Image (cartoon, rainbow, N blue to C red):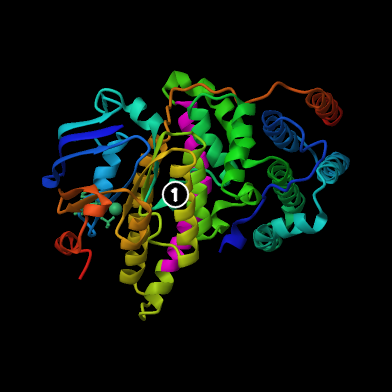
Amino acid sequence: MIKRLTIGQYRERYSFIHGLDARIKIFYVVVLGFLSFRLKFGLEMLIFSLFVFGLVYSAKMRLGELSKNLRPFYSVFIFLVVMYLIFSRSQIEKGMIYLWRFLMLIIISLALTFTTTIMDLIAAVEFFSKPLKVFGVKSRNVALMVSAAVRFIPVMFINFERSREAMSSRLADFRRIRHIKVVVLLMLQKMLKSASCLSDAVYARLYDENMEINKMPKLKINDYISMVAVAAFAVIIY
Amino acid sequence: MIQAKNVYFKYEDELILKNISLEIYEGSFTAIIGANGSGKTTLAKHFNAILLPAKGDVLVDGISTRKDELNARKNIGFVFQNFEDQIVYSTIEEDVAFGLENLGLEQDKIKRRAADTLKRLSISHLAKRNVNTLSLGQKQLAALSGVLAMKPRCIVFDEPTTMLDSRNKKSIMGIIKELNKKDKITVILVTNVLDDLKYVNNVVVLKEGRTIFNDKKSKLNNKILKVAGLYD
Ligand SMILES: Nc1ncnc2c1ncn2[C@@H]1O[C@H](COP(=O)(O)OP(=O)(O)OP(=O)(O)O)[C@@H](O)[C@H]1O
Ligand SMILES: [Mg+2]
């Protein structure tokens, strides 16, 4: 189960992109995503693709890793292609663009998560959620919530698997709604218990939602260089 | 260092702790023992203000936990019975940093202290591993490192050995003993494993939310353990 949940995990390597500030990288993902929506079929697409593969290359992602991480999406792609072929052959060109965009966005996001630790990502999320203060959202709570989700969602799957196995070994039949209900309730119960323990533990270690911590380092020279590069690319393709 | 004075506590309407008074001395190694459901965890959670008494008072260095939670929590660390749930972050390294951030330390000091703590517990090689892939014994140490790094003067261990195999049991008890002897950390060990008592000097026995014994280990006898339901 755990093995299947490792999509887009951080790989510790040394590359230009690994060294960039997490905030900037998130910003680039947004910019590139936006750009990809403005492109037309043909040369622009080719240039963009080359740029993205340039990113993959300089992030030292191996093609094998990339294709392994894309595997969960293959079935979606194939499904979409088949749908276009059956239902709207006339719009196949448009369809290809959509698929291509989707693929590019996934690859760009993978390049982000491959080169950025979860810790840095969360710190960046905390940074970006600071303006939400006006709505009474505390950025530190946001960061804690994201961390806890990252930590405990796999645990949830493991618990689910355990309950399911335990019930199966006593001949439960998961085609029956009643049995499905029991596993789900069991899982919820465990989650609530974990959550209450987690909350105790967090306060036991002096958690204070109002504390302001500046975890983000100052931008470095490479960050500025990358900005120039991305800006130049945006201008060319726009 | 910790004093409980006529502490009562109830969940909903059920009285769980009944008139508990005890004292934990600086540098001591105290066991709190009792049968399942006797109120050990509930009592222990009073020491660092996770629970506040309904009646009575818990004092840490003479200050009531009611008045100053922070004082209690800074000085008293807690390794929970379900320590797996106590690890907030996905790697040990990040999780240790969590408590240190809350103490308001600078980033580079956090890094250094985290590294020292992991080395101390010989788990440096696990620093970056996903917590979900660790064994139970390793998770126990992970939870402990998050607490130990904050340098509390006292640590409560809630049944640290119940879920471990005998080798891990021995090794964690060895570490706890060393924390008490070498680092002079006051240790409160919540347990129902009588074997663990060989390490301690004071014992508190709980039965249905009351203390039926609270003294030096040498005065403990089988009759009391029998009454507590821990020996037959
Ligand atoms: N959150 C809660 N809500 C209601 N009742 C609770 C809660 N937590 C514990 N209790 C009840 O309080 C009593 C004492 O529980 P506590 O966990 O302190 O016992 P314990 O001595 O630590 O037991 P164990 O050895 O099983 O850990 C039990 O009867 C339990 O059912
Ligand atoms: Mg307990």
Is residue B122 in the magenta section?
A: no
Q: What secondary structure is found at the residue carrying circle 1? A: helix
Q: Which x, y percent locates residue B30?
A: 31, 46
Q: Which x, y percent locates residue A8?
A: 67, 50
Image height of B100 relative to A194, above or below: above
Looking at the picture, tell me which residue is in the foreground, B209 or A191. B209
Name the chain under label 1.
Answer: B
Q: Residue at x 24, y 59 (%)?
A: B36
Which quarter of the rendered picture does the C terminus of chain B lie within? Answer: bottom left
Q: Which x, y percent locates residue A6?
A: 63, 55
Which quarter of the rendered picture does the N terminus of chain B lie within? Answer: top left
Magenta region: which residues? A138-162
Q: Is mark 1 within 8 Å of ligand 2?
A: no
Residue A131 in the figure: left or right of residue A3: left
Residue A191 in the figure: left or right of residue B216: right
- Residue B50 visible, this orientation: no
- Residue furthest to the top: A134
Q: Which residue is mark 1?
A: B177
Q: Residue at x 24, y 33 (%)?
A: B3
